Image (cartoon, rainbow, N blue to C red):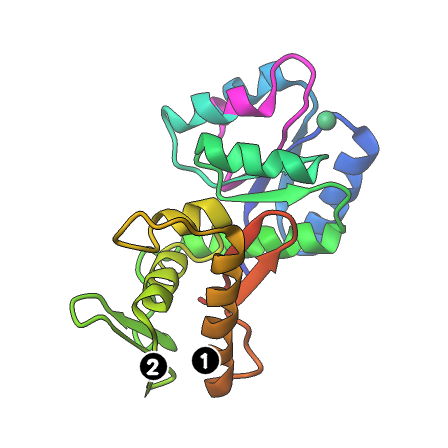
Amino acid sequence: MDAVSAFILIVEDEPKLAALLGDYLKAAGHETAWIANGLEVIPAIRARAPDLVLLDLMLPGRDGLDICRELRSFSELPVIMMTARVEEIDRLLGLELGADDYICKPYSPREVVARCKAVLRRNRRSLPPEGAPLQIDEAGWRASFHGIELDLTPVEFRLLRTLSAAPGRVFSREQLLDGLYDDHRVVTDRTVDSHIKNLRRKLEQIAPEAPLIRSIYGVGYRFEGD
Ligand code: CA
């Protein structure tokens, strides 16, 4: 199933932006509803749960953080958080709100549609498909890509395992660093970047046309595989 049609709730207090998003999402085959006031979001979700919520951070009535927290107390439904400041995303990641993705304004409506599609697909599939290109053998500390065994260092293996366990989730460099070494040696963001670079090179040697690890400017990395 490629085309995923869903009911998407747009929570956005700028009417023009909300209308634009609504148009693009409808053109992609989705049904949408729009709410501009933060206080109305939870009651609306309780009345009719959407398949996905596009949630703006700054809202009149109640902000997106608060809404996301309350939502997560009773529901796992996918949330994409939208914020006007790229530096805000780092802080949001640190709060571990349980949002499925973060989008920074200004965005292109096309990108939002694509991210919605990715999040919806991910949530409709609880297990990685059999025969997925990337296979990780946790116990054996081995990974293969398109049937070819990857020659990875322990650090690269850990990075790949962490990223691929949550496709589509954005990890900050700090979050990736946490799981990188057994000992507590002093490492920097640059260390993560150089390991990622090597890991990417090894993956691209096998399949250059499908970059699996994407850099999110100013934030970190995410795994794009599906
Ligand atoms: Ca706003």
Return the mark for residue 129: none
Residue 191: say if magenta.
Answer: no
Task: Compare marks 2 and 1 and give the one earlier in the sequence.
Answer: 2
Location of residue 174 in the rendering, given as x and y in whole percent from the top left corner: 46, 45
Asked if one can make out residue 9 in the rendered structure from this viewpoint, the answer is no
Residue type of the residue flagged with mark 2: Asp
The residue under label 1 is which amino acid type? Lys
Which residue of the protein is positioned furthest toward the front in this rendering?
186
Q: Are marks 2 and 1 in contact (CB under 8 Å)?
A: yes
- Above/below status of 135 relative to 192: below
The residue under label 2 is 151
Residue found at the very far right of the displayed protein? 16
The stretch in magenta equals 46-67
Q: Is residue 163 left or right of residue 108?
A: left
Query: Residue 216 location, x and y as percent?
Result: 61, 54
Give the label on residue 202, or none.
Answer: 1
* Residue displayed at 52% across by 19% down: 66
- Give x and y (percent) for residue 186: 40, 49
Report which quarter residue 117 is drawn in. Answer: bottom right
Other residues around mark 2 within 10 Å, as few (<14) / some (14–19) / many (≥20): some
- Left or right, 154 with reference to 53: left
Ligand 1 quadrant? top right
In the image, residue 108 above or below residue 129: above
Q: Is residue 37 left or right of residue 119?
A: right
Secondary structure of the residue carrying numbered label 1: helix
59 falls in the magenta region? yes
Seen at 55% across and 73% down, the residue is: 211
Q: How many marks?
A: 2
